[in-house]
Image (cartoon, grey):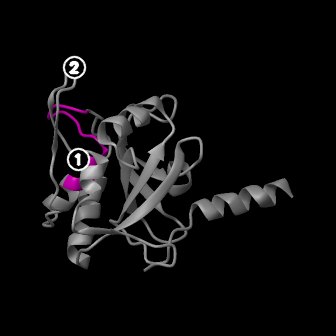
Amino acid sequence: MVLALLGAAAQAADTLAPGAREGDLIFREGTEAVSAAVMAVDRGAFSHVGMLVGRPGSWLVVHASPSEVRGRPDGVVIDALAFFTDPRRSRRHAVYHVEAGDEARQRAVALALSMQGRPFRIAGPAGTYCTELVWKAWRDAGLDLDVRFTSLALPLLPGRYLLPGDLLASPRIRPLAPDGS
């Protein structure tokens, strides 16, 4: 009985709206202190984003993150959707559809996947962070998400950053309703 419930929970965690496609973006409100800090600066609903890869029933998420697994370095990683949305890491999540053709979508996914292992860095050219990862993948695939960067005067890290709320404001993405519309 317990195993059946756990299996059903894992399957539910791997189920998204029927319209979800590779390259779409999945945002989450994280549970870590860094998530609260991002949301305080951004004043948005989400603290983290990744890109969907795979297909229905076997979704994966490529994202740039501080390590969420003991022994795994901070960086661009690929996790199962169930791991990404697990309540230990995510208070809630939502999928946003990227308005793009199939070729651009395939290129964006390939570009994001090619960044696996790149270090997680908030600032500097040696690494990337979550919103920058997905933005660059789409930009380099030929789709301008038409986003604005926010200037922040962070101690030791002043600069212009792409916050989750900035990415959500893109006219090229829209929330994907649970029914796939």
Question: Left of 41 or right of it: where is 12?
Answer: right
Write down the residue under mark 1. Answer: 132
Instruction: Name the residue: 46% across, 46% down.
Output: 29
Disc 1: CA contacts within 10 A as few (<14), some (14-19) or many (>=20): many
Q: Quadrant of the N terminus?
A: bottom right
Location of residue 99 by image quarter: bottom left
Kindly state the secondary structure of the residue where label 1 is placed: helix
Q: Quadrant of the C terminus?
A: bottom left
Judge by depth and name the residue closer to the eye, 10 or 174: 174
Q: Which mark is residue 22?
A: none
Q: How many marks?
A: 2
Rendered position, 167 above or below 48: below
Q: Position of residue 71 (x, y in %)?
A: 48, 28
Question: Left of 77 or right of it: where is 143?
Answer: left
Instruction: Name the residue: 32% across, 46% down.
Output: 116
Q: What is the C-alpha distance between the residues marked 2 and 1?
A: 20 Å
Residue extent of the magenta highlight: 122-135
Q: Which mark is residue 155?
A: 2
Q: Amino acid at mark 2?
A: Pro
